[in-house]
Amino acid sequence: MATRGLSPVSQMLSAVGTWRLSNYSKSLVAKSMYAKGRSFVEAAYLLHKNGGYEFVVLHRLCQGIEVVLKAVLLAIDYDRYRPQLKDVNGHNLVKAADIVLVAAGLSPMERSAWS
């Protein structure tokens, strides 16, 4: 099995093979993804605040939102949503947010609630 170019953790995982994560481990994966997404959003803020290139700011912001939404899905039901993460509507944040709302049993606020 070729492991060249893989990180040490990936090499270890490929050497061990497939195993099932405990519920605690699944929660750690979701929390780690959430922290990564939050860091992307914070990086976007810092770039914006310091005159960063607008495209890069928006890219980091959208990337952060996407990762946070996927982390929420993992926190709701890791086993159901983990296999779908790459397919969760690609980079369509509106569809991803809709999936999270349904998975969480929430409904978005209607415009009339804003007034």
Image: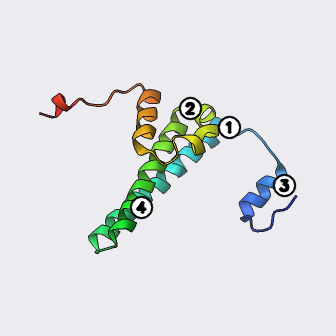
Badge 2 density bin: few <14, some 14–19, many ≥20, Cα 10 Å: some
Q: Nearer the viewer, residue 85 or 39?
A: 85
> Residue 15's mark?
3
Mark seen at residue 60: 4
Residue visible at 83% across and 51% down? 16
Secondary structure of the residue carrying tag 3 is helix
Residue at numbered disc 1 = 22
Residue type (three-letter) at the residue carrying disc 1: Ser
Between tags 3 and 4, which lies in front?
Answer: 4
Q: Secondary structure at mark 4?
A: helix
Q: Earlier in the sequence, mark 3 or mark 4?
A: 3
Residue at which label 2 appears: 77
Q: Earlier in the sequence, mark 1 or mark 3?
A: 3
Closer mark to the observer between disc 2 and disc 1 = 2
- Mark 4: amino acid: Arg
What label sits on residue 59 in the rendered view?
A: none
Query: Label 4, label 2: how many angstroms apart (C-alpha)?
Result: 26 Å
**Which residue is outermost to the top?**
105
Q: Secondary structure at mark 1?
A: loop
Camera-side residue: 25 or 8?
8
Q: How is the image coloured?
A: rainbow
Q: CA distance from mark 3 to mark 4?
A: 33 Å
**Do callouts 1 and 4 mark residues in contact (Cβ within 8 Å)?**
no
Q: Position of residue 22 (x, y in %)?
A: 68, 37
